[in-house]
Amino acid sequence: MNFNLSEEQLMIQQAARDFAQTELLPGVIERDNQQRFPHEQVKKMGQLGFLGMMVDPKYGGAGMDSISYVLAIEEIAKVDASAAVVMSVNNSLVCAGMEKFCNEEQKLKYLQPLASGEVIGAFALSEPEAGSDATSQQTTAVDMGDYYLLNGTKNWITNGGNATYYIVIAQTDPEKKHKGINAFIVEKGWEGFAIGPKEDKLGIRGSDTHSLLFTDVKVPKENRIGEDGFGFNFAMAVLNGGRIGIASQALGIASGAYELSLKYAQVRKAFKTEIINHQAIAFKLADMATSIMAARMLCYKAAVEKDEGKDISEIGAMAKLYASQVAMDVSIEAVQIHGGYGYVKEYHVERMMRDAKITQIYEGTSEIQKIVISRSIVKNSK
Ligand code: CAA
């Protein structure tokens, strides 16, 4: 594995860093307070190519590699984890799945505007009774000939209110269990499709999370993704890639909290010296730096293997499991290093601690990542 970043990758990293500092940082505290979606900033992210980073330019994407994607998400999440999840969902769960599995017509109609950032997308798998246990889909799509009739409720959907196109997973034949699940592209505004109220969340409050309600929504047959019964395997394949995005978001939260703590420790004085000179603080920073580097290496390895076309289910799960734990641990320590200042909003680290928690929950909880990893290591040991 080559650890040197190419010139192009370094340029993308720098562009994301500049964007985060100039466009995201100024309003991030207010957006968190007011639960306000970063509309203007997301639009600019689209113009910079950050919403369809790995998509072929012929479908409106930026045609970059997965390492560039990890680098960009880390930089964005260092400053604004809410903007980072908007980016991760659009890139990994929506665009990547469409590019790999949709037909040409679907790509031209839906992928193009999504990858170019003209509109954003959402991925609707979770339900009130089906979070971790994703095969227990209660949303149904009944085959009516030239369309499916979609009924049910989806929960905790990132980009739920602001998306234009939604990938919706539904059960079409309960007897076939997960082989009777399909994925559909659904458009906002279709009759019978309602968006529930915005969730009032602990963290990533700048992103919008909603339930989605489908009552007799007519979904044209041509909006099914892949062969009949492919929906669950589609969702799993998409989530394998998505976990790299969330791992990178977690990495960004951790490195953002660490960088603020390192700076603070070199100016804040206690007992007549900067607190970095106290071993109690210096050792915390040493632990933070080490775990962040390890998380970063896992993200890079997962990204490289994805671009090599390898099965990334295990390494993607490892990256997410580890990076999300690092985000939690590091952000808690960041608040501790900042002391009383860490507990107030102005210093950013309390937000980072709140934002970190979701990375252990969405796109597969840490417990689900352990199921994925343990099944894989057992399979590979035979
Ligand atoms: N990669 C590829 N295929 C996989 C897979 C993976 N990681 N995990 C399972 N599969 C495939 C299996 O091979 C099997 O396919 P075949 O029958 O064709 O062989 C099929 O899926 C069913 O697998 P299992 O029998 O293992 O199913 P299970 O019910 O025992 O467990 C699970 C599956 C891994 C626990 C799965 O339910 C899961 O990943 N759950 C978590 C769901 C999740 O991540 N939800 C997040 C919601 S999205 C979100 O959060 C988005 C957001 O807004 C940010």
Image (tube, rainbow, N blue to C red):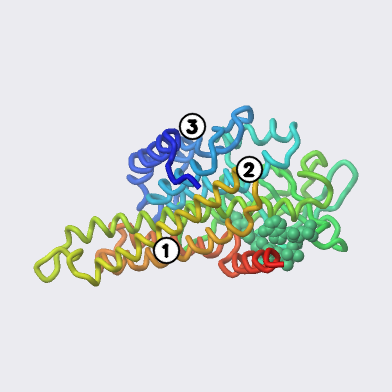
Mark number for residue 354? 1
Which residue is identified by label 2? 96
Q: Label 1 neighbourhood size at 10 Å, few (<14), some (14-19), many (20+)?
A: some
- Split into quadrants, the picture shows ligand 1 in the one at bottom right
Amino acid residing under circle 1: Arg
Q: Element at badge 3?
A: helix
Residue 320 visible, this angle: yes
Residue for badge 3: 47
Q: CA distance from mark 3 to mark 1?
A: 29 Å
Amino acid type, residue under disc 3 in the picture: Gln
Pinpoint residue 292: horizontal percent, then vertical percent. Answer: 40, 58
Q: Position of residue 32 (x, y in %)?
A: 40, 55
Asked if residue 154 lies left or right of residue 42, the reply is right
Nearer to us of marks 1 and 2 is 2
User: Residue sitting at 37 percent across and 63 percent down?
Assistant: 331
Tell me the crowding category of disc 2: few under 14, some 14 to 19, or many 20 or more residues within 10 angstroms, Cα based.
many
Identify residue type, mark 2.
Ala
